[in-house]
Amino acid sequence: MKVLVIGSGGREHAICWKIAQSPKVEKVFCAPGNGGIEIEDKCSNVNITDMDGLMDLALEEKIDLTVVGPEVPLTEGIVDKFKDRGLSIFGPSSRAAMLEGSKIYSKNFMKKYGIKTAEYAVFDQIDKALGYIGICSYPVVVKADGLAAGKGVFICQNYREAKSALEDLMIRNVFKGAGKKVVIEEFLQGVEASILTITDGNTIVPFISSKDHKQIYDGGVGPNTGGMGAVAPNPYCSEKVLEDFAKNIMEPTLRGIQQENLDYTGIIFFGIMITKKGVYLLEYNVRMGDPETQAVLPLMKSDFVDLIQAALSKRLLSFKLEWRKGACCCVVAASKGYPAKYETGFEIEGLKKENKIFAAGVKKENGIFKTSGGRVLVTYGIGGNLEEAIECAYENLKRVSFNGMYFRKDIGK
Ligand code: AMP
Ligand code: GLY
């Protein structure tokens, strides 16, 4: 098989790495990929990002399967387009991708199908939104309706902060239209978990649970980032939590997908909050998480291509998805200054397969790996338990270096 993976981050490197392990796979193309992905056998980058170009590539190269990493092409309808041309592609239709693409759509969906989520109100007029934040209790959460690369959520402690968030979204239009409409919701106190699942529209199967570390500094302080590291399984996901999640969130989601007639063969990533009052759903993502994928896929024993093919042919119910025992930890090495301003172009030493690396903001120039982004790479470690996995991930990180390399020292701790 020839497989095309769309995207360029650490998540896509992990997806390519896992897909390339399938004995069925002869070649993996990553579009546009990054400088580090080609350390994997069978994997090469192709420098294409536009949808028509990707479709031409898939037709010319006779690609047997396309896997989409990020949300933007999914909401823009890449799956619908590929299918129209008879190409096999794994992911939700654009209508189904609204579960991530519009917070208003997803909150209304949750409400309609009885899925436990924070109380909320929707606004498309600033004066009404301002009226609401004058009477609501605090903290309150203000969210842009549309996609904002993970930056469209504001936790506001008081009226002044909520007003400033609303003005950024609805007047200053900082997310170019994504914040014209907003959701204002109840703040939930608890611990978060990321649960990736796979669905074929008839069945939904959870992966091993995971935990992201969103803030830049140790102890979970400082501004939010794209994620500074992850562990799997998530130590807070007890049997009881997972049962609550399956019964009250995952299963009603599948019922909703069926009743709304959403064409969904792909990953559903549930961002949940574990509270004293049970498990709440914060959000849906219609793709795998980054960096959760880099901690989850190393634990997957089954052949990922077999799993995806089972979903595409609606055979998930009889697929035996197997996981390795133990745990995995991945730690992000970022450029100094990230998530604000940072410099790039520094040489990276130690970017080798044996150091267990997934590359993200990496380019290759004249045979030399250099930094090209905020989150540069992750190293991962697998262990019999979480402590061992953490130790192993940090051991691997010691073998990698670049000017200004920054990482959290408390991933999984
Ligand atoms: P979302 O994109 O909706 O998952 O929001 C991004 C992040 O904001 C989440 O991962 C949480 O850390 C936080 N968040 C979102 N909604 C809430 C809420 N209702 N209560 C507390 N934290 C929230
Ligand atoms: N790690 C969170 C996300 O991928 O959205």
Image (cartoon, rainbow, N blue to C red):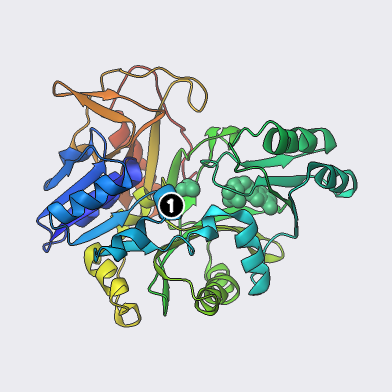
Report the side of 253 relative to 228 (left or right): right
Task: Pinpoint residue 295: horizontal percent, then vertical percent.
Answer: 37, 50
Q: Which residue is outermost to the right? A: 135
Report the side of 393 relative to 282 (left or right): left
Task: Pinpoint residue 154: horizontal percent, then vertical percent.
Answer: 68, 40
The amino acid at mark 1 is Glu
Residue at image position (69%, 33%) is 168
Quarter location, residue 393: top left
Report the side of 171 relative to 211 (left or right): right
Task: Pinpoint residue 227: horizontal percent, then vertical percent.
Answer: 47, 40
Residue at image position (60%, 41%) is 177
Residue 269 visible here: yes
Residue at image position (44%, 20%) is 336
Quarter location, residue 120: bottom right
Q: Is residue 263 above or below residue 223?
A: below
Q: Quadrant of the N terminus?
A: bottom left
Q: Is residue 44 above or below residue 222?
A: below
Closest to the observer: 300 or 367?
367
* Residue pointed to by mark 1: 76
Report the side of 46 relative to 316 (left or right): left
Q: Which residue is outermost to the bottom? A: 318
Query: Under tag 1, what secondary structure?
Result: loop
Closest to the observer: 135 or 94?
94
